[in-house]
Amino acid sequence: MKRALRRYAPWVVVALVVAAGVVFTQRTKAVAVDIVVAQTHDVQTSVVASGRVLAPARVDVGATITGRVEQVAVREGARVAAGELLVRLEKQELSAAAAQALAARDRARSRVVSVATLALPTARSALMQAEANAMVAEQEWRRSQDLLAKGFISQSRVDETGRQLKVARGQMDSARAQVSAQEAPGAEAQQARSQLVEAEAALELARARLAQTDIRAPGPGVVLERVIEPGDIAQPGRRMMTVALDGPARLIVQVDEKNLPLLETGRAALAAADAFPNQRFEAVIAYVSQGVDASRGTVELRLDVPKPPAFLKSDMTVSIDLAGPLLKQALFLPAEAIHQLQSDAPYVLLDRSGRAVKAAIRLGLQTQGRVQVVEGIRPGDRVILNREIEDGARVRERL
């Protein structure tokens, strides 16, 4: 038995050495990776972001009075002009109220005219008559006193003429009061004018309420939504339809805050609607938000569209391409080559003599899937694109 073991021992040793060599080779076998050689180029930078078309103004149209809908004059998608009829409410009751107010106004106006042209002349005529009567009564009273002194009449006769004089003077005072009341500053004239003012205000109110039965477009635009039909009850505060008013086309876009140095009012951009990607149109930055959205790390832009295409509609999704400065001999890498891109410690893996070596970097602009590296690597460095490779691993370029 021992002799047999001695005979096979060398072969066992050889087998163990071969197996160990295979295991070692497998453990140290180089991994095939994709490599990009860092190079510098003149790069025209740009910012690409998405947003939407911002409607100039959206108006929720509703009634200011309660009433039954008699007619809805427009449909969704219809273009309307300023003042065009949208909805009409039943108006019989308010028409009757306006007619009553008109009649009351006419009566009040007639009374003012009557006071000025009839009552006042009549009062003045009555005053003249009363003054004449008072003068005659006074003359009669004086004559009776002379006759009494001469003994021709009795005292009772004098007393009678005195009473007649008092009555005549009272009638004269009453006629003067009537004239005063009928004249412009007088109570009767003022009351007539006040009633006319009140009647005219009531008529204006009735006509205003009647006019509110016709609900019209506040300006030119397009009906986006209609939520009422004939027979429905309209109430104040209830939306009937929504109208997008015409106005300058404007885009609202969220741009990564890292591109803030490129954002300034007046800068031109090219825009395209997602539904029509091949039909690009010009846009101009009109507003740059003074704040940054902390939750998304973006800055809001608003861009004017000087010549909006016909297909542009409210809330349509759009993309913009904003040209940036020309970077001389800048070094850009594909974004997938950079590890921890959104952190404070980005890095890349370099191929150094078949080994993956970690290199910390400092980043610059990010645009169109490429990132500027301003520090950490040099032109000619071989950058590994594969994310799954670890620092120190053996690598070889994939053929």
Image (cartoon, rainbow, N blue to C red):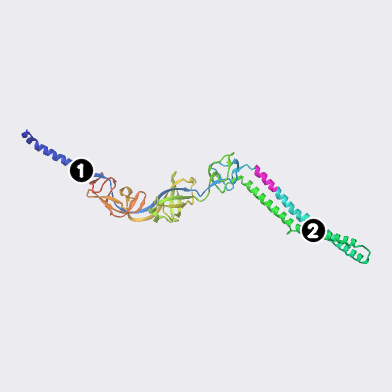
Give the residue drawn at x 65%, y 50%.
204
Q: Quadrant of the C terminus?
A: top left
Q: Where in the figure is residue 133, as x and y percent of width and height?
A: 85, 60
Check the image and name the residue furthest to the top. 1
Q: Where in the figure is residue 262, as x and y percent of width and height?
A: 40, 55
Q: In this view, does 157 lie to the left or right of 328?
A: right
Gap in angstroms between the C-alphas marked 2 and 1: 132 Å
Check the image and name the residue furthest to the front. 155
Confirm whether the magenta stretch covers residue 302.
no
Q: Is the magenta stretch mostly helix, strand or loop?
A: helix
In this view, the residue in front, 218 or 352, is 218
Check the image and name the residue furthest to the right. 152
**What amino acid type is highlighted by mark number 1?**
Arg
Q: Is residue 272 left or right of residue 244?
A: left
**What amino acid type is highlighted by mark number 2?**
Ser
**Which of label 2 and label 1 is nearer to you?**
2
Quick one: SS at disc 1?
Answer: helix
Check the image and name the residue furthest to the left. 3
Q: In which quarter of the image is the N terminus?
A: top left
In this view, the residue in front, 207 or 251, is 207
- Residue tagged 1: 27
Q: Where in the figure is residue 341, as x and y percent of width and height?
A: 33, 50
The part of the image, by quadrant, that contains residue 26 is top left
Q: Which mark is residue 315?
A: none
In this view, the residue in front, 202 or 307, is 202
Q: Is residue 351 above or below residue 177?
A: above
- Residue tagged 2: 174
Span of residues in magenta: 92-102
The part of the image, by quadrant, that contains residue 79 is top right
